[in-house]
Amino acid sequence: MKEEYVCNFSCPTDLKYIQDTLYVISGKWKVLIIVSLSSGHKRYREIAKSIPNITFRMLSKELKELEMNKLVTRTVHNETPVLIEYEITEYCKTLWPMLSEMISWAKHHRTVI
Amino acid sequence: MKEEYVCNFSCPTDLKYIQDTLYVISGKWKVLIIVSLSSGHKRYREIAKSIPNITFRMLSKELKELEMNKLVTRTVHNETPVLIEYEITEYCKTLWPMLSEMISWAKHHRTVI
DNA sequence: CAGTATCCCTGTAGATACTG
DNA sequence: CAGTATCTACAGGGATACTG
């Protein structure tokens, strides 16, 4: 059974996948946190300072979700005082083709709107 | 000045673009509506019926936003009784490469999570 | 049919204080 | 430093009734 996979908007499974992806990266802070980590910020307060108006509460929550999705790692270094480092994973970089498409689309969309 | 464009997470402009795109397609109903229209539903009640639990309120609101973003057209046919048809635009199809990436990513992500 | 208008509820996020 | 706990506010969305 040769099955040619033709994607179109009406495939219900695809819909589910799109929703999954949106769920992982949507929200007010997710992408901002990924950007902050990407630009080298590693420590909690450091990340917090780099993102205007984010609260500890939100930063904790979002970091946890990113960690659950394997996009971020949290490493505890047993020094005194304890040092904790957040880093984006290699896996996080698999997001890039998609983000890249999002950037292209938005760029073009600006010229349309 | 040959400028090689290297995209990376830390570019602030790219961040803005990503947020723009998310804004256009995020939300509980947007993609569902696009799917419904893609599968041939055109009339308001018809679309409403095809999407479980959506309210008229939400359908109106989302259709308006999609229209503003040129992803959907609203056509009034002057018959009696009046007939109104919603359709996705050709432009809407420019979303496809991105949606396709989102689908691929989510598919792979499932195997990771 | 194609929507609007209104009321109301709940969940999400902000503010602030506190802990190990 | 690296967070958690608690309280609160407000907006986004649901339910329902209504209009042209």
Image (tube, coloured by chain):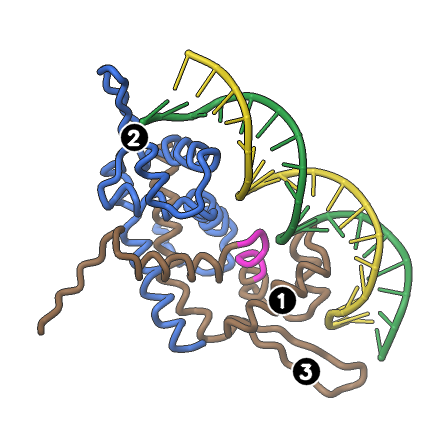
Chain colours: A blue, B brown, C yellow, D green
In the rendered image, residue A7, in percent from the top left (x then y), is placed at 41, 58
Q: Earlier in the sequence, mark 3 or mark 1?
A: 1
Which residue, given by chain and number where applicable, does mark 3 sit on? B76
* Secondary-structure class at tag 3: strand
Q: Is residue B71 above or below residue B76?
A: above
Q: Chain of mark 1?
A: B
**Residue hosting label 2:** A73
Instruction: Provide residue B86's location: percent of width, then percent of height.
Output: 62, 73
Per the image, label 2 sits on a secondary structure element best described as strand
* Amino acid type of the residue that numbered disc 1 sits on in the rendered structure: His
> Of residues B75 and B24, which is closer to you in this image?
B24
For badge 3, the amino acid type reads Val
**Quadrant position of residue B74:** bottom right
Look at 49% across and 48% down and name the residue there. A19
x, y (%) of residue A29?
43, 45
Magenta-drawn segment:
B27-33
Please tell me the numbered disc located at residue A55.
Answer: none
Read off the residue under disc 1. B41
Q: Nearer the viewer, residue A106 or A2?
A: A106
The reply to whether label 3 and label 2 mark residues of one chain is no
